[in-house]
Amino acid sequence: MSNKGAPDELQGNTLRVYWVLLQNSKTSVGPRDIQRKLGFSSPNLAVHHLDKLVELGLAEKNLGEYYLSDKVNVGLFKHFTKIGSYIFPRQVLYA
């Protein structure tokens, strides 16, 4: 699947998992990290959404850890910008 389908697929918990990967773009993230940060009931739920991001081409999996491989501006993310490891609302830059 290419990134062209990514905006349609990025919603709900998959979008929340993508947000965590975006915040940790310099490091790897494991399913248990996602589970704890987002309050999922099990790591398997995190794996499901992480694998969905891998299928979309937005993440890569290596030895059970996930990495952000591509960034897309979709929905909510159109209103944010990333500077270094920080994510800011775009309106902050105009204030």
Image (cartoon, grey):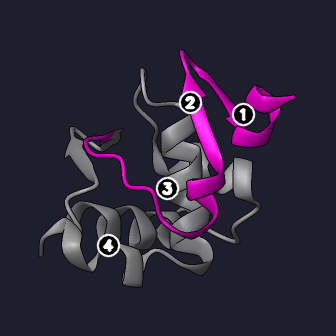
Q: CA distance from mark 1 to mark 4?
A: 22 Å
N-term-proximal mark, 3 vs 2: 3
Q: CA distance from mark 2 to mark 1?
A: 6 Å
Q: Are marks 2 and 1 in contact (CB under 8 Å)?
A: yes
Reading the image, the residue beneath label 2 is 82
The vertical placement of 50 against 10, above or below, is: above
Q: CA distance from mark 3 to mark 2?
A: 14 Å
Which residue type carries mark 4?
Ala
Reading the image, the residue beneath label 4 is 6
* Mark 4 surroundings within 10 Å by alpha-carbon count, few (fewer than 14), some (14 through 19), many (20 or more): some
Residue 88 x %, y %:
72, 33
Q: Are marks 3 and 2 in contact (CB under 8 Å)?
A: no
Image mark for residue 64: none
Which residue type carries mark 1?
Phe
N-term-proximal mark, 2 vs 1: 2
Q: What residue lies at 49% left-to-right and 43% top-to-bottom?
A: 21
Look at discs 3 and 2 and give the one toward the viewer: 2
- SS category of the residue bearing label 3: helix
Q: Kindly give the residue lying farthest to the bottom in the view shown.
A: 8
Q: Which residues are magenta?
A: 68-95
N-term-proximal mark, 3 vs 1: 3
**Which quarter of the rendered picture does the C terminus lie within?**
top right
Q: Nearer the viewer, residue 83 or 93?
A: 93
- SS category of the residue bearing label 4: helix
Q: CA distance from mark 3 to mark 1?
A: 16 Å
Reading the image, the residue beneath label 3 is 18
